[in-house]
Image: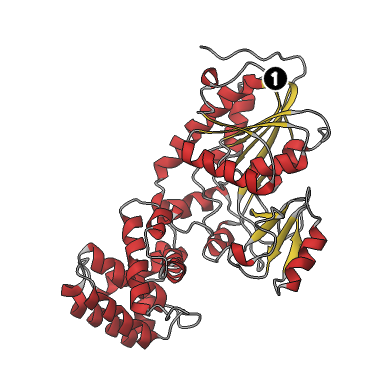
Amino acid sequence: MHPPVPLWRQLQAAASVLAAVRRGESATPAIARLHADVRPGAQALAYHVLRFLGRAQALRRQLANKAPPPAADALLTTALALAWQEEGAPYEPFTLVDQAVEAAKRGKDTRAQQGFINACLRRFLRERDALVAATEDDSVARWNHPRWWIAQLEREHPQDWEQVLEVNNTPAPMTLRVNTHRISREPLRQLLAAQHIASEPVGLHGLVLDRPHAVDAIPGFADGLWSVQDAGAQVAAQLLLEGLPHDAPLRILDACAAPGGKTAHLCELARHAQVVALDVDPVRCERIHQNLRRLDLTAEVRTADAGEPAAWWDGKPFDAILLDAPCTASGVVRRHPDVRWLRRESDVAQLAAQQKRLLTALWPLLKPGGTLVYCTCSVFRAEGEQQIAAFLAHNSSALLRPGPGHFLPRDGAHPEGLRDNEPRDHDGFYYAVVQKSAQHAPAPPEA
């Protein structure tokens, strides 16, 4: 058994993740660089900090008008994010302060500010109630999202914006998608229960675990019995294949496919289909291969830009196309709490332009009578219903079929869930099902 990692080391590591996010880097690679022994605890702390960063930054401004150097500011903000709540704080306040000062003392970039950090945190402990109250009128502190994000949600979802923001600040559940080609849901649920892992059914093929577990601690992973996939994401393959014969030799395109969860689900549900999976990143394409091998599934994986079909399309039209388009990821903030701090308001329009480009490029590749499912893990309407409304207005061959549209992230405390699905925790998504008129013939892409 390895000795426990001291809290000061975890605080140092969590602060380094926050500093990376402040520099514009995703938390994922920053966490991956951490030493293996400190990584799990530091990730949990860093995610907590990112969920309450708005409040912590407002408190830091109360304590010091002038920001200290970046490393010291990141450590101080990390401690404040972990200490500001009277109930539910991860650590006892005086222990946290002591260990934060120890972290400052042991860090070469923070050693000179250890006295400053100690003074700020001791004052915070003395004046916590007054300091927290002084931040209540700051919407960024109240909701822990950028001001533009809050305003856009309020404008676009006037009945639900507060609930969405609250849900975004809670950890996401761990949800499995059962590989029904290998095992049914109830036998897998019993297999998990035998290892004291409780779960509840969700949707057609999902199981929500009572709490997250390490992947290698859950039976059946190496045997390909299941994959980790949010309940909201599991809707994609089901929608695309709805009404199509599962035993027919369908030709299906999964554009923007990495890391391959939706590709694998398509292969599981349509065993006789020829599935083509595209992604522009060769490293991410290798992840698709790895997932398919584990599940004993086959798809044709190509490294290519879906928006440039002249470079990869063989001229044979597809029966169905899944376009899981690049987006702001505003619907998966529970899983990626850094997203809200990395995005800029201008990103919404830039990504919407990219989504339009992909829709325009892929539509000619669809057979007459074929189905395209457009989806994004976004709650912003420019990436959802507004995008599809503009597409329909410019494509007379496109017919909108019944589909979920926008559904917002939910947790167990807010039980309204997916339409035509059991209400459970899930991320936010947009789905549109678009059918091509049977009279329309595909045009080849320009060379």
Q: Residue at x 38, y 77 (%)?
A: 132
The residue closer to the viewer here, 189 or 318, is 189
Residue at 37% x, 86% y is 95
Q: Who's the residue at 75% across and 71% down the image? A: 193
In the picture, measured across the screen, residue 224 lies left or right of residue 124, that is right
Establish if 169 lies above or below 288. below
- Which residue is at a point 47% across and 59% down the rendered structure image? 337
- The answer, for residue 404, to whether it is visible in the render is no
Q: Compared to 324, does 444 lie above or below?
A: above
Which of these two is toward me, 9 or 418?
A: 9
Percent x, y of residue 146: 41, 56
Q: Residue furthest left?
A: 112
The quadrant in which residue 423 appears is bottom right
Task: Please tell me whether residue 293 is drawn above or below residue 119 in the rendered image.
Answer: above
> What is the crowding at mark 1: few (fewer than 14 residues within 10 Å), some, or many (at least 20)?
some
Is 191 on the left or on the right of 278, as rendered? right
Q: Is residue 80 visible?
A: yes
Location of residue 398 in the rendering, given as x and y in whole percent from the top left corner: 69, 24
Residue type at mark 1: give it.
Ser
Q: Which residue is mark 1?
A: 397
Would residue 136 be found to the left or right of residue 373 on screen? Answer: left
